[in-house]
Image (spheres, helix red, strand yellow):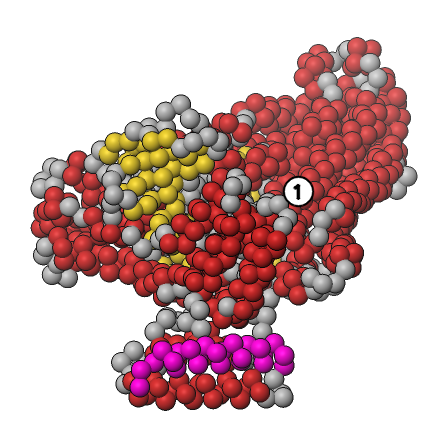
Amino acid sequence: MQDALALVDLVAKAASAYQRPDLARRLAATRTRLSDPAVHVLVVGEFKQGKSSLINALVGAPVCPVDDDVATAVPTAVRHSEVPYARVRYESETEGAEGDVVEIAIEDVASYVTESANPDNREKLRLVEVGLPRRVLATGVVLVDTPGVGGLGSAHAATTLAALPMADALLFVSDASQEYSGPELDFLRQARELCPEVACVLTKTDFYPSWRKVAELNRGHLDRVGVRAPILPVSSTLRHDALDAGDQELNQESGFPALVSHLRDEVARQSSLGVVGAAVADMRWAVTQLRSQFEGELAALADPARAQAVMVRLEDAKAQAERLRSQASRWQQVLVDGVGDLTSDLDHDLRERIRQVVKEAENALDISDPAETWDEFEPWLYRRTAEDVAHHYALMTRRGRELAAEVAEVFALDGQEINLVVQTGSPTDTLGGSSTLSALELKSASVVTQALTVMRGTYGGVLMFSMMPTMLLGLALPLAPIAAIGMFLGRRTLSDERERHLGQRQAQAKTAVRKYVDDVSFAVSKESRDNLRLVHRQLRDHFTSQAEELHRSAAAAQLAAQQAMAEDGATQARRQRDVEAELQRLAGLSARVEGLAGYQ
Amino acid sequence: MSLLGDVEGVLQTAATATAGTPLAAEVAALERRLHEPLRLALAGRVKAGKSTLVNALIGEELAPTDAGECTRVVTWYVNGPTYRVTLQPRSGAGRQVRFHRDRGALEIDLGSTPPEEIERLVVEWPSGSLRSTTLVDTPGIASLSTDVSERTVQFLAPGEDQATPADAVLYLLRHLHTTDLRFLEAFHDDEVAQPTPVNTIGVLSRADEVAAGRLDAMASASRIAERWRGDAKLRRLCQTVVPVAGLLAQTGRTLREAEFDALRRLAGEPGETTEAMLRSADRFLAEWATCQVTAPERQVLLDRLGLFGVRLSLGLIRQGGKSTATDLAAELLHRSGLDELRSALAGQFTARRDVLKARAVLLALDEVMGRAPEGPGASAVAGQLERIAAGAHEFAELRLLNALRIGALAVKDAELEDMERLLGGAGPSLAARLGLEADASPDAVRQALEATLTRWRRRAESPLSTRPVGDAARVLVRTCEGLLVATPG
């Protein structure tokens, strides 16, 4: 990671030196992404399993309130920051708008997130964010403490499930007092399909003598349902004592070093592979742009006889780059069409899912008396809806990535033509005269093409990746309607009305179902539309600036070639040597970038 | 005529009506059940500590307990003249099975019978604790193996037309989970009263683990139980919630001299040493060169007391002056909350034992008679059943108590509390029912009772009372009158 940062700085310096502030800006953005990669780790589990203690012990500070009774009601995200801070993000009142953000003191976090201070999240908090200068988090890990209230079968669990497709990793927390229960294992089975990295943390090992046995039993359960996840036994209490006393041995015993290294080596590394990969692609791109500037000039200098042809091609290249950055370019079309398709596909997907849920619900209500079956029916409805929403989000993430890849592909294909022109026709008849050049040419055959091709693989993922933080914040299932149903159609009301007609009860129940499902579908479709807008904007900005950069490279190459042609022979010879030297230097830089790519 | 007398009467009619049919045996069984001890079932999620609590209540380590899921078959613990275990398969006759007891828990040899084909195991054990109550240990719900959970649901909430074999239930909760609520909601019936919190007591089990071993765990647990008692959802489902540290209770009742001796020697070690040892379970079991207590001894202590129990015991020996095994055991028992649980049991269940049993028997009889052929005998039984269900004041009280618990009666909170108390919600004693101190003078009690009677009589006759409130007041008037008759002076 440090190597990558140093190299980005070096390439950025080169870009500034060669008068390409646009490339320097891109690299500055790369640097930011690289130094703050934001790996979202959801901490999930039944309530009172020690999730908040786990996070506190991990960062060595009481950021998440811990109580024997009250549980966490609002998700808390803990991330790295040199300057400690805490802020509260509220639900937005109006559609499409960001909610208010209020800075608070870190000591006050408890009064915002606990169940007793904020029952049923009446304050309408969306998220509490805490920043701390901690080494564990320096790799970009963002720990998200989720509310466990109500158990895994409940509506809260539904929210968590829905957030899974956006998370980079999942820490599933259960304490060592007992093996997994049915609902816990169900959750894990589903999580496996929605999240790439799952690890199971077994807490309170200091307190339960038979934790080894429990771990072993859990291992067996995980194997049986095919969840390949490590089990990490930890004791937050021991970790705490160890940090207080600076006791290395005790720290080892607490099991936390293994957890930390899992976060650093597995979770953060997996996603840093992505971030570094993207940085490599950015640097390749920048170096290639710098090189193509000189290569055009060199082509003109090396063979004055064909200089005119080179000039014409450079002119062409510029024009093509111009087209690439215009509204009418092919990639723009693909992007606009793709977003349109995606919007309607997602809309359709959601509608189809919701319709299926409603259909099943109504079928069930038709053949039973809601007064008797509502108790089982209600949780079923929540679970069923949550699963569908989770799969809907998973589809959105996947299709978003695919779209990014598709646009990258088209962009690369159209960019390739520009590239060929810059490289000038067939290398043998155009550049054959210069041995230096042909040697260079072999290596740089189609550097730009490479750079563009690389994007196909990387950018799709990385662009989506850089959007995740926003998406993760955006995820919320409406919980309020759930409470409303309970009141509206609670057991009591139903029992009181026992004498009334069955049909009326069924109709009432169906209305409640439709109202709930409508609320869910409204909230979810708003989320996914907002996210799509974000995808659209990011992809457009990204490729537009690349087109700009291509254009600028072509223009610079043309200008340099023109100037070179105007000089006398001696100056030209000197200039050729200079340019070759510059290209050598850039080739060196290029080699270092490739080295970084290989090192991964 | 007393309620039990009425029930016996209807059972006799039923016996005549079913004489000579296969149902006769079932009616006879109900007749016996009426005179048997109250059947108290322990239910809850897996690993809620049911078996440990069974042991604590019996005062012996009988039910096997383990880190993994342990109880897989519904097991009855019955007072009997000899030690005997009977296996009752789902079909066929019960047979005696072999068992042996090796330093504690029973090991029962089920032979070749798979658990799913066993309806129940009946452990007969001569024990004073079982004389008034039969305990039924059930497999945990939300178990990974659904058929194990299924057995408990089958047992306690068998569905539409079947009566549950249990008279009352202790429901063990570690946290309030949705499955718990759903299960509790399923465990009720509609005949005598709708959702019946009256025969259920909630237990915040494994209370010693609430604070992950801190010494104030029990205080914390009491606070949680207190909050749960006020929780509207739970109020509808159980009488009260009591925190119990099952392991402490079990060991408190069965503490051995050798164990106390080991604890005493451990308490003799320097404070820093024991503190370092008690840092974690692993450390406690590790090699400690200078320690006077051997590792196997420490293993026993940890198994029997848990980390919290060991910490607590050391404190009690060092500062609390508990210098004998009996003293320590008594204190552990006291701290475990078992006493509170027993007094809740006595107040809520034992005092109402006859009503609860009568209710269970009537429900079962109704179910049995539903299968009997039509005839004058059957309709006589049905008539009598209905008369008892509608007429018995005890059931009227139960119904009212239920209505209060589920919040079906629109009265102010203070009045609600008064009504519940008068019906024995805070304890069966007269003083408790009237909200007086336990040592109130007979005169004061009598005066208060008369005042209460007048108040409810007025409420019953007031044209301003709504009908449900008027009905409730009439029930309370009868309750007061009954109490007045039973009060000397």
**Whole-percent x, y for residue A291 in the image:** 70, 28
- Work out whether B114 lies above or below B217: above
On the question of residue B232 being in view, the answer is no
- Work out whether B47 lies above or below A318: below
Using the rendered view, name the quadrant where residue A294 is placed. Answer: top right
Label 1 crowd (10 A; few <14 / some 14-19 / many >=20): some
Magenta stretch containing residue A383, yes or no? no
The majority secondary structure of the magenta stretch comes to helix
Residue marked by disc 1: A387
Pick whichever, A305 or A384, lies toward us.
Answer: A384
- Work out whether B444 lies above or below A121: below
Residue B302 relative to residue B27: left or right: left
Pick whichever, A178 or A49, lies toward us.
Answer: A178
Kindly identify which chain the residue marked by label 1 belongs to: A
Disc count in the image?
1
Numbered range of the magenta stretch: B466-489
Residue drawn at (55%, 59%) of the image:
B385
Magenta stretch containing residue B473, yes or no? yes
**Whole-percent x, y for residue B148 in the image:** 48, 37
Pick whichever, B444 or A538, lies toward us.
Answer: B444
Considering the image in quadrants, where does the C terminus of chain A appear? top right
Using the rendered view, name the quadrant where residue A578 is placed. Answer: top right
**Whole-percent x, y for residue B307 in the image:** 26, 47
**Whole-percent x, y for residue A169 in the image:** 55, 39
Q: Kindly state the secondary structure of the residue where label 1 is placed.
A: helix
Residue drawn at (60%, 37%) of the image:
A190
Residue A122 relative to residue A433: left or right: left
Residue drawn at (36%, 48%) of the image:
B135
Pick whichever, B75 or A191, lies toward us.
Answer: B75
On the question of residue A381 being in view, the answer is yes
Amino acid type for the residue under numbered disc 1: Glu
